[in-house]
Amino acid sequence: MKVLTGAALAVVVGLIGASVAIGAATLTKNQYIAKLQTAQTQRTKAKTTALGIGTTGMTPAQVKANFQVWAKTESRLGRAFAALKPPSAAKKGNADLVKAEQLYSTQLLAIAAKLPSTMAEINTYLLGLKQPTGGKLLNHALAELSAAGFKV
């Protein structure tokens, strides 16, 4: 077992403390907008893949796996935004965004679990679904942030 010297331990503790302090800093408006834009890109990619937009020949198993990835993306984004310290003008919108991401993730996982076993049935099933409330809440949170000056 290796024992850290006093100097090495001080460096490790300093690095941990610095990373905690950096994570706790309030984001600037531009930093927060950049986070929103990155999240939107990731969200769009996961959604596009899950819905098979521009793709042919997907199997039911691939559709299910893609929906699960989309759900996990929404969940990860929710956790990431929960850990942020947004600018004061974005606090309410950010809190709403976190709740929406988590709800949407849960709903997408439920959809994935109920997907039928053939592509024809999957298409019919998906076309018959109403927009999940998590998606509506997500759109509302993004509109709220946009109205506060944080346009994506």
Image (cartoon, rainbow, N blue to C red):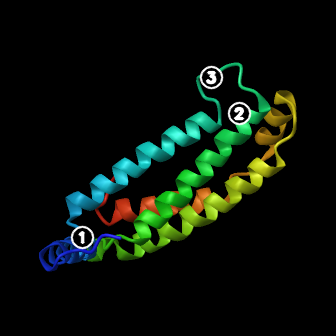
Q: Nearer the viewer, residue 78 or 13?
A: 13
Q: Are marks 2 and 3 in contact (CB under 8 Å)?
A: no
Task: Find residue 76 and report its horizontal and vertical position in percent.
Answer: 50, 58
In the image, what residue occupies the spot 55% across and 60% down?
75
Mark 3 secondary-structure assignment:
loop
Question: Compared with residue 38, is residue 122 higher up or lower down, i.e. above or below?
Answer: above
Which mark identifies residue 62?
Answer: 2
Up-down relation of residue 18 to residue 69 (above or below)? below
Q: Mark 2: which amino acid? A: Gln
Residue marked by disc 1 = 19
Q: Which mark is residue 47?
A: none
Amino acid carrying mark 1 in the image: Ser
Q: Is residue 72 above or below residue 148?
A: above
Q: Residue at x 23, y 68 (%)?
A: 27
Q: CA distance from mark 3 to mark 1?
A: 41 Å
Callout 2: SS: helix
Mark 3 or mark 1: whose residue is earlier in sequence: 1
Instruction: Locate residue 21 relative to residue 116 in the image: left or right.
Output: left
Q: Between label 3 and label 1, give the one nearer the viewer.
A: 1
Which residue of the protein is positioned furthest toward the top in this rendering? 57
Q: Which residue is mark 3?
A: 55
Q: Label 1: how many residues lie within 10 Å, few (<14), some (14-19) or many (20+)?
A: few
Decide if residue 132 is in sight here: yes
Q: Quadrant of residue 65?
A: top right
The residue located at (21%, 58%) in the rendering is 30
Of the numbered discs 2 and 3, the one sitting upstream in the chain is 3
Q: Is residue 152 visible?
A: no
Work out how far the residue at label 2 is from the one at label 3, CA to CA, in angstroms: 11 Å
